[in-house]
Image (tube, rainbow, N blue to C red):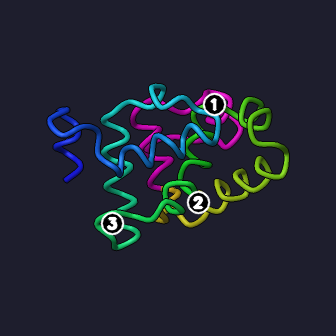
């Protein structure tokens, strides 16, 4: 159960460790993503994958978009390179067109949490509503 790890009773859950590792691998220190957001991200990933404990690849895929939104284009590019930047921006554009995809829900979560870099909000004209 991921919640038990939250209270430190049995240590940090494997799922939250996977999410932290994926965020770190993309260039974001895990402490820059609030725990409440991580728990909700985990829930969204679990629902979308249909698995009680999503595969590492699921976390890695989500981390790209999460880190881009959190850091902005310039910092993301410095950490991950131009091809990764182009790919994540294409994902964000697609998410905005589709509206109900996992990527769209992740971006909406970050918007609600005031966790999106202002430059990303401006570039993609993001809003809650």
Mark 1, secondary structure of its residue? helix
Q: Earlier in the sequence, mark 1 or mark 2?
A: 1
- Return the x and y of residue 5 as percentages of the image width and height: 22, 41
Query: Is 66 placed above or below 94 here?
Result: above
Residue 121 occupies quadrant: top right
Mark 2, secondary structure of its residue? helix
Q: Earlier in the sequence, mark 3 or mark 2?
A: 3
Say which residue appears at 22% left-offset and 37% top-offset: 6
Q: Earlier in the sequence, mark 1 or mark 3?
A: 3
Mark 3 or mark 2, which is nearer to you? 3
Report which residue position mark 2 lands on: 95
Report which residue position mark 3 lands on: 47
Report which residue position mark 1 lands on: 71
Residue 118 occupies quadrant: top right
SS majority, magenta: helix
- Return the x and y of residue 49 as percentages of the image width and height: 40, 70
Mark 3, secondary structure of its residue? helix
Contact, mark 1 vs mark 2 (Cβ under 8 Å): no
Residue 3 belongs to the span the image colors magenta: no
Span highlighted in magenta in the image: 105-129
Residue 123 belongs to the span the image colors magenta: yes
The residue closer to the viewer here, 99 or 25, is 25
Say which residue appears at 62% left-offset and 49% top-offset: 64
Residue at mark 3 to residue at mark 2: CA–CA distance:
17 Å
Say which residue appears at 36% left-offset and 57% top-offset: 44
């Amino acid at each position: 159960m991921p919640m038990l790890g939250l209270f430190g009773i049995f240590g940090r859950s494997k799922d939250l460790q996977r999410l932290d590792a994926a965020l770190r691998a993309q260039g974001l220190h895990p402490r820059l993503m609030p725990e409440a957001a991580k728990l909700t991200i985990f829930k969204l990933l679990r629902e979308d994958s249909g698995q009680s404990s999503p595969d590492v690849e699921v976390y890695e895929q989500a981390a790209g978009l999460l880190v881009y939104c959190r850091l902005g284009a310039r910092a993301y590019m410095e950490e991950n390179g131009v091809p990764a930047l182009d790919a994540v921006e294409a994902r964000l554009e697609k998410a905005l067109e589709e509206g109900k995809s996992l990527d769209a829900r992740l971006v909406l979560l970050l918007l609600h949490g005031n966790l999106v870099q202002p430059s990303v909000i401006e570039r993609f004209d993001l809003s809650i509503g």
